[in-house]
Image (tube, helix red, strand yellow):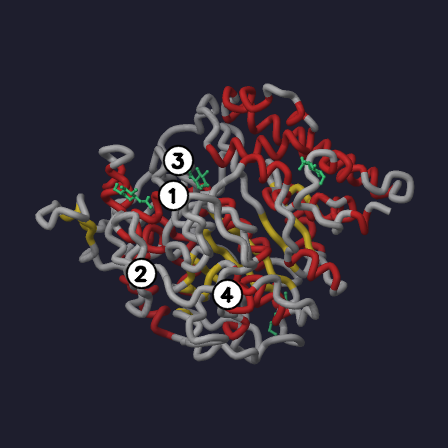
Amino acid sequence: MEEIKRRLVALSYAVLVLLAGAASQAAAGGPIKTVVIVVMENRSFDHMLGWMKRLNPEIDGVDGSEWNPTSTTDPSATRVYFKDGAQYVDPDPGHSFEAIREQVFGSNVTSASPPPMNGFVQQAASMSSKMPEAVMNGFPSEMVAVYESLVSEFAVFDRWFAAVPASTQPNRMYVHSATSHGATSNDATQLALGYPQRTIFENIDDAGLSFGIYYQNIPAVLFYRNLRKLKYAAKFHPYDHAFKDHAAGGTLPNYAVIEQRYMDTKDQPATDDHPSHDVYRGQMFIKEIYETLRAAPQWNETLLVITYDEHGGFYDHVPTPVRGVPNPDGILGPSPSKFNFDRLGVRVPTIMVSPWIEKGTVVHGPNGSPTPTSEYEHSSITATMKKIFNLPSPYLTKRDAWAGTFEGIIGRTEPRTDCPVQLPTPVKIRKTEANEEAMLSEFQQELVQLASVLNGDHRTSDFQNVIKKMNVGHGSAYVESAVKRFLEAGMAAERLDSVMPCLLELDLEAEDNSTSGGSDKEYCG
Ligand SMILES: *[C@@H]1O[C@H](CO)[C@@H](O)[C@H](O)[C@H]1NC(C)=O
Ligand SMILES: *[C@@H]1O[C@H](CO)[C@@H](O)[C@H](O)[C@H]1NC(C)=O
Ligand SMILES: *[C@@H]1O[C@H](CO)[C@@H](O)[C@H](O)[C@H]1NC(C)=O
Ligand SMILES: *[C@@H]1O[C@H](CO)[C@@H](O)[C@H](O)[C@H]1NC(C)=O
């Protein structure tokens, strides 16, 4: 292990590219024709990558001097220091809007700038006595060997934030639409109806470019209502068969989204890194994606983007930006906070991979571009797609017009030929099998809720109670069968487009006439 580390340090120093201004040198007409997006679950930068500062001091990570007090109001409180003993974590640390406010500001008063990042331990202690230790730990780099290799070979972003200091679904929505349409929490009812905002998928489709979703269990992008349109049914592919086939055949679309398994079963353990799922599985999933792309005929025109939806309650030492962040669309969050979407969430890991990226690249902030306060956050993805693909549509919101763009990492004049063909096999972390008897987490319940809309079961008055009683094994089987039926019906309907042009929307229309606007009608003849 020591020898590997020494080698990695040498590699990391080999090249160091700091993105100055990240101008659009590789914009439209550049070499990238396929962008692959993977959004993992609920881990902070320091928790996953902070200790990689040992491999490359240029990375803004940790050295063990970081600490949080057990109480932010007691000057003599015990200090809990950040360690490198991250292990399998169960249960899940707090990552609601209120929990994050306490983690970042140490209290519910949000005026400090920069925020002190001192309430992680206090907030965790309010959940369980073991939690403070869990949130103040990161993985030593050899435990996340796939990332160790990608960080030393390609690019790590050490100043990329969750778009909103809130939970999973609001952040996932920012990734493809640069807004959560006012959501600061996972609102099961609205998620089932679908969120109405325009997405990057439509801008890509309108420009005559292609997109595809490679899903397992269920595609969470169906939380965007517009993706439930009939004309998009053929964009959804089961990951297990289609991803490798398309990659090998050179038919990956311009914008490919790969979704992981969110349900944890014995035969098919979850791969999303969400606590209590095993990070080893997430590492194996990333390894498989990388090796598939590396072997593909499209490798020389591919950019792989790996990020995390939010920090999952785990400590990070970088103050979250609280000044100059624009509200995307004028919508405020729900009462009582009526959040104005004017500060970002906690820093998350982001890694980018392409043969056009110099080895050992570390990207800090966007250096005052396009505005003095601009930062990298999830809206940077839609902002950069506009540049890379020269999309004629305007920015989706004020937020992606503001976010830093990253086309500048494609800095070489020719692709590298020394990128590893295989990545290391990481160590297993969880010692036990998946617990299929476990009750569904909040996130998994939302996925079942989504599946119930696709299936029509959400109309059954007691379906909410059915969901609450489902375990992971049942939930997993339920969503998979619902998605299969939905997409099969969609494909069949697409062939019969003129006969029943609006099959999928009809189901939803009856219930929701507030948010859909006129946009569905254009496809509903
Ligand atoms: C903040 O916390 C204090 C003390 O617990 C409480 O009295 C106050 O109502 C809280 N304010 C908000 C905005 O939640
Ligand atoms: C991640 O966030 C989602 C949304 O807040 C939450 O439902 C889920 O439980 C969190 N992840 C884990 C691992 O718990
Ligand atoms: C990628 O480009 C390199 C350098 O031009 C070339 O050697 C290699 O064969 C190309 N790979 C593919 C899959 O086209
Ligand atoms: C649908 O719209 C009508 C008329 O605008 C309104 O009265 C009704 O409450 C709406 N229904 C729902 C479920 O929002």
Q: Residue at x 52, y 31 (%)?
A: 445
Image side of residue 445 versus residue 12, left or right: right
Ligand 1's image quarter is top left
Mark-to-mark CA distance, 4 and 1? 36 Å
Instruction: Classify the position of the N terminus by image quarter.
Output: bottom left
Considering depth in this image, is 432 or 295 the residue closer to the camera?
432
The disc placed on residue 318 is 2
Question: Badge 3 local density, few (<14 within 10 Å), some, or many (20+)?
Answer: some
Q: Which residue is mark 4?
A: 419
The secondary structure type at the circle numbered 4 is: loop
Please report whichever mark, 1 or 3, sits nearer to the chain's N-terminal start. Answer: 1
Q: Which residue is mark 3?
A: 276
* Residue 139 to residue 403: above or below: above
The secondary structure type at the circle numbered 1 is: loop
Please report whichever mark, 4 or 3, sits nearer to the chain's N-terminal start. Answer: 3
The answer to whether residue 140 is seen in the rendering is no
